[in-house]
Amino acid sequence: MKKYTTVIGIDLGDKESVFAVMDSDSDEIQFEGKVATTRKAFERCFSKYEPCTIALEVGTHSPWVSRLLEGLGHEVLVANARRLRMIYGNDRKNDKVDSQMLARVARLDRTLLYPITHRGETAQKDMVFLRARDGLVRARSRLVSQVRGIAKSFGERLPACDAHAFHRKIKDVLPSCLQDVLDPLLKVLKELSLQIDVYDKKIAELCVKSYPEAAVLRQVKGVGPVTALGFILAIEDPHRFRRSRDVGCYLGLVPRQAQSGALDPQLRITKAGNVFVRRLLVGAAQYILGPFGEDCALREWGLRLATGGSKRAKKRAVVAVARKLGVLLHRLWVTGEEYDPHRGLCCKEATS
């Protein structure tokens, strides 16, 4: 690994970013400055430096900034903000101090930054389809809940139905006094469903044309195009993990640890990594354990965990199945093998 003579820490702001420059052989800050958080400003500012090590925190701007700086020949370390307690837990936290801290940590021991790797620009663009669709689905769910709540306040309980057909099936059963008031909401729900269908078609096309490996993942019943594509785009390179079971850690589906001596309490999951993909896997796990789930070894294992019927046991079972599902999907992706729902593969965590 090449050691550069200059180390720069950048605290990325929405409009303006602060940076601190250090020499690798000195403890002193050599120079501090500010730069507008735009492509032109960053290129103009950092193209003046010889190739050096640059540390910055992960955030909204970090994907394009890291790609731009790497294009200028710099080594970029994108720090995991969740692990940098010395920054987010600082009592005197400000942009200037943060940039200095990033530079000092990168100079002393880069592993303390717990650097992450951003997905490529193509994968980031394709992920936009999934996130845009997710925004529409969540907006539709909120509107459906609002309509149901309004109806309840008038003593009416609307029948259960699929959110996609809610605007059509509910219109005729709404109380007459609410028809005119809620009709605009039903029209919006109709338009949301139409736009969600448009995204579904585009996502299906992406799976076929650009990500044929999605078909291998979709062998598992409960894993649709959205979940398969989201998993692929989040991982991007399946060979980045030495073992398939490491995917569970990467997506934050493993318990946190606070072991000390004989004390080893059972804690909640870390919730690290991609929140959106973790939610997709949990949704798929709920389907697998639900009434429409396929009879398979993964389902049987999850149902055994949920024995007792308590809400806590069921939640643990769902999370555990989501983690196992992530391991299974990675294993299928790497090997390309045919999925056997009754094979012990999905109940024994893969070790490769």
Image (cartoon, rainbow, N blue to C red):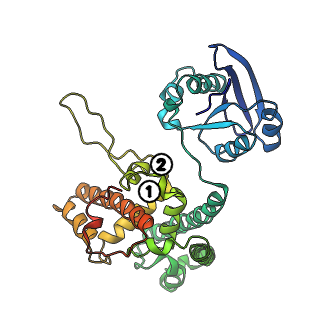
Q: Is 301 situated left or right of 168 in this image?
A: left
Q: Residues within 10 Å of mark 1 (few under 14, many from 20)?
A: many
Measured in 3D between alpha carbons, the distance from the residue under mark 1 to the one under mark 2, in whole angstroms, is 8 Å
Relative height, residue 153 to residue 11 (above, below)? below
The answer to whether the residue labelled 1 contacts the one labelled 2, judged by CB atoms less than 8 Å apart, is yes
The residue singled out by tag 1 in the image is 278
Identify which residue is drawn at 26% across, 77% down.
295
Q: Residues within 10 Å of mark 2 (few under 14, many from 20)?
A: some
User: In the picture, residue 223 is in which quadrant?
Assistant: bottom left
Q: Is 178 situated left or right of 265 in this image?
A: right
Relative height, residue 141 to residue 238 (above, below)? below
| First in sequence: mark 1 vs mark 2 | 2
Q: Amino acid at mark 1?
A: Arg
The residue singled out by tag 2 in the image is 273
Could you say which is closer to the camera, residue 223 or residue 109? 109
Q: Residue furthest left?
A: 308
Q: Is residue 186 visible?
A: no
**Which mark identifies residue 85?**
none
Look at the image and tell me in which quarter the C terminus lies.
bottom left
Identify which residue is drawn at 33% across, 57% down.
319
> What x and y, as percent, mark residue 330?
42, 62
User: In the picture, residue 199 is in which quadrant?
Assistant: bottom right
Look at the image and tell me in which quarter the N terminus lies.
top right
Q: Amino acid at mark 2?
A: Gly
Q: What is the secondary structure assignment of the residue under circle 1?
A: helix
Could you say which is closer to the camera, residue 32 or residue 152? 32
> What x and y, as percent, mark residue 179?
56, 79
Q: Is 347 situated left or right of 135 in this image?
A: left
